[in-house]
Image (cartoon, helix red, strand yellow):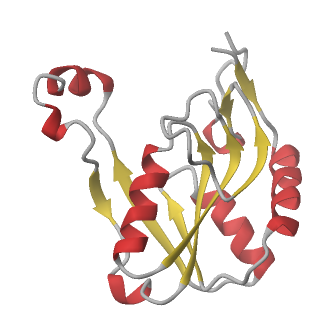
Amino acid sequence: MRKELISWLQVDKLIDHLIPQFNTEFDAILMIQKGGIIPGGLLAEALGIQALYIADVEFPKEFELERQRSDPRFLSWPATRSFPENEKIAGRKILIVGSAWGTGRCYSAVRNRVNGANGQPFTCALHYCPNKNLFPEEKPDFFAAVTDAWIIYPWESPKGKSLVIS
């Protein structure tokens, strides 16, 4: 898979591309750990949103998935390590922010939790990867770019190491 390292300036341009898409005012931003923290913070500052929450959702790694295939009851259940209380979500418009929508599993899990808490979820990604998406009928409500590359964001870059991408 092709990899692409993007700069802080490119992130800023992606945020600038997202903001005009918002056709509603949000009550809170729910940032998907950890890729959504920086774009979520940038959007919160730009939109003047004070209520910020973190969702830490983890799906099994590939080697665990392989082992679980023999018992599919456990295949798609994520582990939620951190999520805001239902009272902070109920009756509110929640912007769910991550860096990239790849398979869509984390976004779907978080969106379903927001729905379950009687919140109104809206999903937002800097990059949307339709060729990796496991949910063909779904995509982010808001996204800045479509890609087929593995995006390496500036906050993920190997500081002090070779920046040559193979």
Q: Is residue 20 left or right of residue 141?
A: right
Residue at 88 percent across and 60 percent down: it is: 16
Q: Quadrant of residue 127?
A: top right
User: In which quadrant will I find the N terminus?
Assistant: top right
Residue at 31 percent across and 30 percent down: it is: 61
Residue with the most extreme top position: 166
Residue with the most extreme front position: 137
In the foreground, 61 or 37: 61
Provide residue 25's location: percent of width, then percent of height: 72, 84
Determine whether 128 is above or below 162 in the image: below
Provide residue 153's location: percent of width, then percent of height: 69, 39
In the foreground, 151 or 20: 20
Provide residue 163's location: percent of width, then percent of height: 72, 21
Q: In which quarter of the image is residue 83?
A: bottom left
Q: Is residue 126 left or right of residue 21?
A: left
User: In which quadrant will I find the C terminus?
Assistant: top right
Provide residue 108's location: percent of width, then percent of height: 45, 53
Q: In this view, does 112 lie to the left or right of 148?
A: left
Residue with the most extreme left position: 71
Residue at 36 percent across and 79 percent down: it is: 117
Residue at 55 percent across and 35 percent down: it is: 133
Determine whether 14 is above or below 111 in the image: above
Determine whether 75 is above or below 42 in the image: above
